[in-house]
Image (cartoon, rainbow, N blue to C red):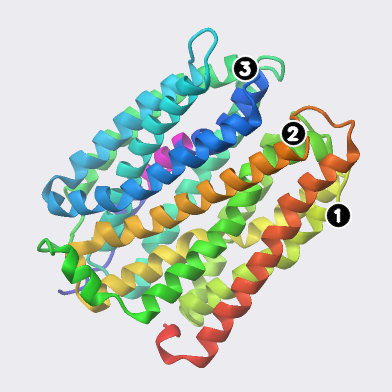
Amino acid sequence: MSNQSVNKTSLIKYALFGFTIAFGGLPIYLHSPEFYSSEFQISITQIGFTLLVLRLIDAFQDPLIGYLSDMYSKFRSLIIILGIVIMSIGFFMLFNPITSPNIIWFGSSVFIASTGFSIAAINYQAVGGLWKSSSTDKTTITSWREAFALIGILTASALPALLGSQENAQEAFRNLVFIFIPIMIITSIVFYKTTQNIPLVKPKHKSIKTLFKNIQRWDYQFLTLFFINNLASSIPAVLVIFFINDRIGAEGMTGLFLILYFLSGALCMPLWNQLAKKLSNFYSWSLSILLASITFIWAGFLSLGDINAYAIVCVLSGIALGADLSIPPSILADRIKSSKIEGLTSIYFSSLTFLSKFALALATGITLPLLGFWGYEPGNITNYEVTEYLSYTYAFIPSVIKLLVGITLFSLVKNRVDWRY
């Protein structure tokens, strides 16, 4: 396979679709639990257990989605569009609920939306992985894709506050739905036309046996560290809105804090990209994880009214985000190319989405019921001891986990040749 220079116009159009997937994905995974607990008084424990089950199902179906996608890879563009349509249906149901939605409506909507998200995201990443390009260009492709995804996340973070009042969250998210649908239609058309011009490797479908024959100790170590790192990131992702509202006392400023966090990640992504080219993907990733752990831990010391301090934590911890999002997919793309197993591209990328979702499921299933057991109720900030538990869970635990992952990864990169590219 000869490498080709990546066409910048095609790259931008390809990356633009990442905006749509991220724009639709953030409210599903971040806003919906708080939306249903606050607006419809559904128990946080019920929501936690429901999301645990759903995200486990969602995670375990990802390898199947990857396998079927590789089997029918000639229809990959249409499969991606199908995924976006399914996600849009679930998105509409989730934020345009029946008059008095129950936990079954919530669960059904999340399942449909997240299934569509998985179909689209796995195949979208596979297109980037199969793009005929050099190793350096692989990092560029993933960086542009994740940069546009961060812009989508930023937009989805800011819009709810702009589209409706704090007292009428239902109106805000209903308006968000009617903005998302036209964006989805336009970017889907652009993406479909663009994929016709992207030079892709034409892989032959390979069996699952081939996958297991190619698995090495390196794969287990990389994916284990990826999972543990994602678990550490998932805990604050699950609790961030509750932490901002009830620990910092900054209800209504969630969008601003998320913008600071994700904007820092987007602006610093080119720096991590350059560092990865100068040192290696692994060195850059390990340094970003260590940076995240030593900056985010300070959130655990904050209390009611520490708005400016929390904003600083968001900026500093957000700096590391760009590397966390762009480097692991680039590492995996290099792995696929070096082992000549392009026929298993979707399955390999589905392993990342599987582990990310399993980590999110585990974080949801542990943290929300645990806080419910301690007596935490969203909106109740009178019990300072209970909000301290929220603070410890939100900041201290994930920071310690990330520190251990960063040290382990740095040690592997330093001492083993096959961890240095």
Q: Secondary structure at mark 1?
A: helix
Sequence-first tag of 3 and 2 = 3
Q: Which residue is label 1 attached to?
A: 301
- Name the residue located 49 percent from the left edge and 77 percent from the top edge: 282
Dot 1: within a 10 Å radius of its alpha carbon, few (fewer than 14), some, or many (20 or more) residues? some
How much space separates mark 1 and mark 3, taking CA atoms?
32 Å
Residue segment shown in magenta? 15-24
Disc 3 marks a residue whose amino acid type is: Phe
Q: Which residue is label 3 attached to?
A: 40
- Name the residue located 56 percent from the left edge and 63 percent from the top edge: 229
Sequence-first tag of 1 and 3 = 3
Left-right relation of 256 to 196: right
How much space separates mark 2 and mark 1, taking CA atoms?
19 Å
Dot 2: within a 10 Å radius of its alpha carbon, few (fewer than 14), some, or many (20 or more) residues? some
Which-is-in-front pick, marks 3 and 2? 3
- Name the residue located 39 percent from the left edge and 53 percent from the top edge: 354
* Residue furthest top as drawn: 99
